[in-house]
Image (cartoon, grey):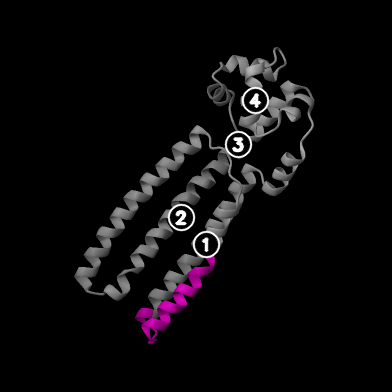
Amino acid sequence: MNIGEKLFELRKKKNLSQEEVADKLNVTRQTVSKWETNQSTPDFDKIVPLCELFEISTEELLKGRKTEENVKNESEKGLTKEEVKRKTAEIISTSVFTYIVAVAIFIVAIDMIKINEIIIVSIFLCVIAWPTARIIKHFISVPKFEETKEEKREKIIIKEINSIIGAICVVIYFLVSFTTMAWHITWIIFIINGLICEIVKLIFLLKEDSIDEK
């Protein structure tokens, strides 16, 4: 594999466009295109920045050989960016389902089943502990990939949407609490808020996945 093919493969693996690579290296898109089609080779002062961008050694780029450190890092990461997105979508969707079931059981138990409220709350917290632990473990353990401009923009949008939802839930919480004086129950609104925020993340993840498949 020549340098051009290698650069093309590395760029695709990082899910970057030629424009994004060009911006990071302070060159034109046409220059990146010429590198990938072997019409020219990167200047000496661009070799190290290219290797840093694609997280490889200069030996791997120039000679096609991976160092032991790179092989180890790849084996530790294991999953590709697309596989991580699918895994994240699966974990969030199953966790959201568990949360919905837990909330439904909690509401029914409070209104219809005459059980001590402390027992009901304890059972509820135990049920949601498992999906919560899965989400935390997943986001701590998954490999970190460099975000594209589109991903950064979507993350900002998600943050803004969730902030608005959070503010609305706080208003609803106080309105319902002061109206009904059921302070021992209305805190469930904050659980619902978290549930909605996870659904928003899931929608964007599924949207990205459908775009990638196209």
Q: Nearer the viewer, mark 2 or mark 3?
A: 2
The outermost residue toward the top is 39
Residue under the image location 25 percent in, 58 percent down: 171
Residue tagged 2: 198
Question: Element at badge 4?
Answer: helix
For residue 48, the mark is 4
- Can you give x and y, in whole percent of width and height, for residue 44 in the image? 67, 17
Front one among 176 and 117: 117
From this view, report whether residue 123 is shown above or below residue 165.
below
Residue numbers of the magenta segment: 110-133
Label for residue 8? none
Q: Residue at x 70, y 30 (%)?
A: 9
Q: Which residue is mark 1?
A: 95
Q: Nearer the viewer, mark 2 or mark 4?
A: 4
Q: Nearer the viewer, mark 3 or mark 4?
A: 4
Question: What secondary structure is marked by label 2?
Answer: helix
- Element marked by disc 1: helix
Separation of disc 4 and disc 1 at Cα? 42 Å
Rendered position, 1 above or below 133: above
Question: How crowded is the residue under tag 2: few (<14 C-alpha within 10 Å), some, or many (20+)?
Answer: some
- Residue 214, labelled with which disc? 3
Q: Earlier in the sequence, mark 2 or mark 4?
A: 4
